[in-house]
Amino acid sequence: MARRIEIKDLDIHYGRFCAVRGVTLSVPARSVTAFIGPSGCGKSSVLRTLNRMHEVVPGARVEGNVLLDGEDIYARDIDPVAVRRTVGMVFQRPNPFPTMSIYDNVAAGLKLDKRRLKRSELDDVVLRSLRAANLWDEVRDRLHKPGASLSGGQQQRLCIARAIAVEPDVLLMDEPCSALDPISTLAIEDLIGSLKERYTIVIVTHNMQQAARVSDRTAFFTLAGVGQPGELVEDGDTQQIFGNPRDRRTEDYISGRFG
Ligand SMILES: Nc1ncnc2c1ncn2[C@@H]1O[C@H](COP(=O)(O)OP(=O)(O)OP(=O)(O)O)[C@@H](O)[C@H]1O
Ligand SMILES: [Mg+2]
């Protein structure tokens, strides 16, 4: 069950610093949305508000609303841990638990669950998640080797397997390929293409070609200057944003004339 996200009039603060102002954006279900824009414009900050990871930063604050299928994830009776289960996250640097086995890495989120799975059920989820992450064939004979024994690209796919093992509806990815070589990058891009049949995906990327290749929609953020809050300039179908942007700032950025 993939979910639609609506961000309404979102402001993000770190202490007294306003990092992002006035973002309103809709992310349709079962699609890939790319966040692009210059460094410091708040892409990662906005992404982290979508699963309440933002609030683990001391002094960080959010105003406005984030709705998942119409339900405010910041409502008082909503448990942030449950939100993070529904909205999974993959980070820039592959971060498997290094000494934990490949198998246990994938099962890690499930073991936090109150409902204890039988070994055979766990085996099943690990298999399915590794298949979905397009890693199974490479690790089927070494499931009990440590996570750190994999290449960077394999580790990133392991992290994606770990994220999808708990069956989220939404996957957030913050520059998931920036530490990877071109072959691993293509493997992750292919994977994103297949995952969007089931998940709503939001990806931050600095790579314009990647945004154009993997995303259905693109949101361009910028900031007027150092110390100014980031803002959303425009969002739309990726083809339109890259081929026929409405705002001059978008055009300058995608054609490399920024700054
Ligand atoms: N934990 C934090 N504490 C204080 N300020 C922060 C924190 N994280 C980010 N910021 C500030 O918020 C602004 C937006 O940062 P953010 O990391 O969201 O930008 P970004 O668009 O992801 O940049 P990049 O492309 O470099 O990753 C920046 O000015 C940054 O310094
Ligand atoms: Mg960032």
Image: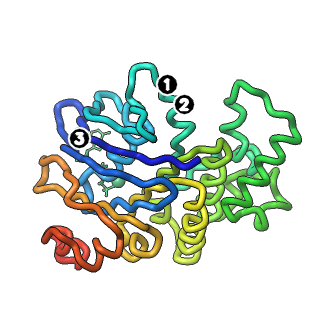
The CA span between labels 3 and 1 is 22 Å
Q: Position of residue 57 (x, y in %)?
A: 36, 33
Q: Position of residue 81 (x, y in %)?
A: 53, 29
Looking at the image, which residue is at 19% across and 59% down? 233
Whether pointer 3 and pointer 1 mark residues with C-beta atoms closer than 8 Å, the reply is no
Q: Secondary structure at mark 2?
A: helix
Q: Quadrant of the C terminus?
A: bottom left
Disc ID at residue 248? none
Instruction: Describe the colour scheme in one phrase.
Output: rainbow
Name the residue tied to disc 1.
Answer: 79
Looking at the image, which residue is at 25% across and 35% down? 14
Looking at the image, which residue is at 81% across and 41% down? 122
Q: Secondary structure at mark 1?
A: loop
Which amino acid does the dot numbered 1 rest on? Asp
Q: Quadrant of residue 111?
A: top right
The CA span between labels 2 and 1 is 5 Å
Disc ID at residue 82? 2
Q: Secondary structure at mark 3?
A: strand
Mark in front: 2 vs 3:
3
Which amino acid does the dot numbered 2 rest on? Ala
Label 1 CA crowd tier, 10 Å (few <14, some 14–19, many 20+): few
Q: Position of residue 118 (x, y in %)?
A: 86, 34
Name the residue tied to disc 3.
Answer: 9
Closer to the chain start, of discs 2 and 3, is 3
Closer to the chain start, of discs 3 and 1, is 3
**Would you place residue 129 above or below residue 179 in this image?**
above
**Would you place residue 67 above or below residue 129 in this image?**
above
Whether pointer 2 and pointer 1 mark residues with C-beta atoms closer than 8 Å, the reply is yes
Which amino acid does the dot numbered 3 rest on? Asp
Number of disc labels: 3
